[in-house]
Image (cartoon, grey):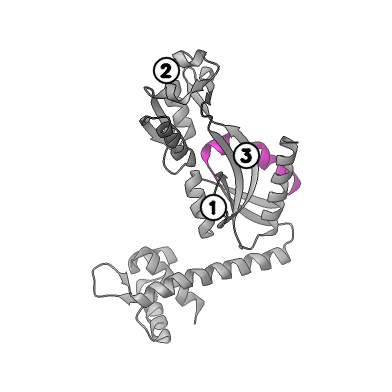
């Protein structure tokens, strides 16, 4: 089996279109159709149902699509392994981070790591924590920052920080004068939350429900800057007040996750080691 044939079929199956797949692969549509047809002839089975207006996979096509993705993932891991052997202290790490985590923690972390390993490139991709988990599980990311707990059967976990959730309010808000706020005091308030891609979205809603009320969500966003501006409204964002939430307090434990049994590149190993050192120094 020609790996190119398999790769071309996977792109058609993913996009459900020869036209879109040919554009994505930068080849002509007739060439793409011929390559997929050759694969079908080699396997002696139809992979694509061409009778419908929209492309559908046959039962055999679904099997080849599922197994083919695993084959291509294995080839990618082989390439990474060989690269590591030949380029010991070089490489690239793709790390998924929720936007707020990137703002609060990662600038210093990345700066410190790259002082030690200047030839390792770090590509930060901003996703909500829920989406980070899915991308790490699929192998699209090498590492991800997630709000714990996560599924320990799917991921290896490296905790690196533990915090409590805070309430952010305008300085003029009545709750801003309090030293702490109980969750049931928020029953009549309007909330601005991260959207459902973020683990904290679900966790806060669950805490409100356990306190006996449904939160009144006025806005949802994936952007921390936008949320900060919405809270501050027409006042200076520098005087927005952070107030601890109690009864119950909502934990905010973060960890670096990686897919179980996935090959870990030299670059990723060094980054995990660096993060473990940072965690030990922080909680010594």
Q: Secondary structure at mark 1?
A: loop
Residue 186, horizontal then vertical, whole percent: 42, 23
Please give the label number shown on residue 106.
3
Please give the label number shown on residue 151.
1
Q: Is residue 114 visible?
A: no
Q: Secondary structure at mark 2?
A: loop
Spatial CA span between label 1 and label 3? 24 Å
Q: Residue at x 68, y 68 (%)?
A: 82
Residue under label 2, please give it. Answer: 234
Residue 192, horizontal then vertical, whole percent: 41, 29
**186 relative to 116 in the view: left or right:** left
Residue 31, horizontal then vertical, whole percent: 39, 76
Question: With respect to residue 6, does 208 lie above or below?
Answer: above
Residues at circles 3 and 2 in contact by the CB criterion of under 8 Å: no
Question: With respect to residue 253, does 142 lie above or below?
Answer: below
Q: Residues within 10 Å of mark 2 (few under 14, many from 20)?
A: few
Region rendered in magenta = 97-117
Task: Please tell me which of labels 3 and 2 falls first in the chain.
Answer: 3
């Amino acid at each position: 089996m020609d790996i190119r044939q398999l790769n071309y079929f996977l792109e058609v199956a993913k996009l459900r279109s020869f036209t879109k797949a040919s554009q994505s692969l930068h080849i002509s549509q007739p060439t793409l159709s011929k390559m997929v047809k050759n694969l079908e002839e080699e396997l002696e089975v139809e992979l694509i149902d061409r009778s419908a207006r929209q492309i559908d996979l046959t039962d055999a096509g679904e099997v080849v699509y599922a197994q083919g993705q695993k084959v291509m993932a294995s080839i990618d891991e082989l390439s990474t392994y060989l690269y590591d052997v030949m380029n010991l202290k070089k490489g690239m790490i793709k790390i998924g981070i929720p936007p707020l985590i990137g703002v609060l923690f990662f600038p210093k972390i990345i700066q410190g790591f790259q002082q030690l390993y200047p030839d390792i490139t770090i590509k930060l991709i901003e996703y909500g924590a829920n989406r980070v988990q899915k991308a790490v599980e699929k192998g699209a990311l090498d590492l991800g920052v997630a709000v714990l707990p996560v599924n320990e059967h799917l991921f290896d976990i490296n905790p690196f920080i533990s915090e409590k959730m805070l309430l952010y309010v305008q300085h003029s808000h009545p709750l801003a004068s309090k030293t702490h706020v109980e969750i049931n005091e928020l029953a009549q308030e309007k909330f601005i939350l991260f959207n459902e891609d973020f683990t904290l979205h679900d966790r806060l809603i669950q805490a409100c429900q356990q306190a006996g009320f449904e939160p009144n969500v006025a806005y949802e966003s994936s952007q921390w800057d936008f949320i900060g501006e919405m809270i501050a409204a027409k006042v200076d964002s520098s005087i927005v007040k952070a107030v601890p939430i109690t009864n119950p307090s909502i934990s905010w434990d973060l960890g670096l996750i990686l897919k179980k049994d996935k090959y870990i590149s030299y670059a990723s190993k060094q980054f995990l080691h660096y993060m473990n050192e940072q965690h030990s120094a922080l909680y010594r």
